[in-house]
Image: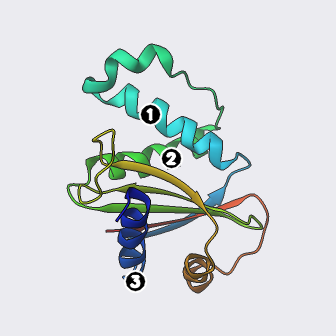
Amino acid sequence: MDDSSEAMERILEMISRDPVYISDFKLSKSYTDISNYWNYWLVSNTESFNLLKAYFENKTIFNKNEKEELDTIFSAHFNSSDEHLILFYKNAEDDIFLKLKSEKVVNTLNIPYWSILLKDKEIKKVFKKYFKSKKKNIMNVMIFT
């Protein structure tokens, strides 16, 4: 089984459970902005990545509330001791952005963090189950363990 198939298998297994965290907040930024901020957050908060800090600058500008929300989510993701999945879905988007932390999925970089952008109707159904708002610029977030 290749890395991506293995990762997808883990994701589908995790979303079959109830989420441990559900939130939505106003966010006008893109999934790329979230991904860039994760990279910046990770190297800024991890001693082992400190050498990379010079290569990652905070290219996205989030307001205080957005930053606090993302910092809380990323901290929980980083500090989780087991598998951890964050799903980001922005209303009216075709894609879903997810962050997977899993030691069970082997990758060439030998780090447990995955960032994946995908289109998947089954995962979108999970969002529809928990979120009713259709307003634009609302980021829906669910965390699974």
Query: Which residue position is annotated with label 3?
Result: 16
- Give the residue type that dot 3 points to: Ser
Q: Distance between the residues labelled 1 and 2?
A: 9 Å
- Give the residue type that dot 2 points to: Leu
Local secondary structure at mark 2: helix
Q: Distance between the residues labelled 2 and 3?
A: 24 Å
Q: Residues within 10 Å of mark 2 (few under 14, many from 20)?
A: some
Local secondary structure at mark 1: helix
Image position of 59 with respect to 98: above or below: above
* Labels 1, 3: front one: 3
Query: Which residue position is annotated with label 1?
Result: 41
Lower sequence index among marks 1 and 2: 1
Q: How far apart are marks 1 and 3 (CA)?
A: 29 Å
Type of colouring: rainbow
- The x, y position of residue 102, in whole percent, is 29, 57
The quarter in which the C terminus is drawn is bottom left
Write the residue at 56% across / 36% down. Answer: 36
Write the residue at 39% across / 19% down. Answer: 52
- Give the numbered dot on residue 70: 2
- The x, y position of residue 99, in whole percent, is 45, 54
Query: Disc 1, disc 2: CB below 8 Å?
Result: yes
- Give the residue type that dot 1 points to: Trp
Lower sequence index among marks 2 and 3: 3
- The x, y position of residue 141, in whole percent, is 54, 64
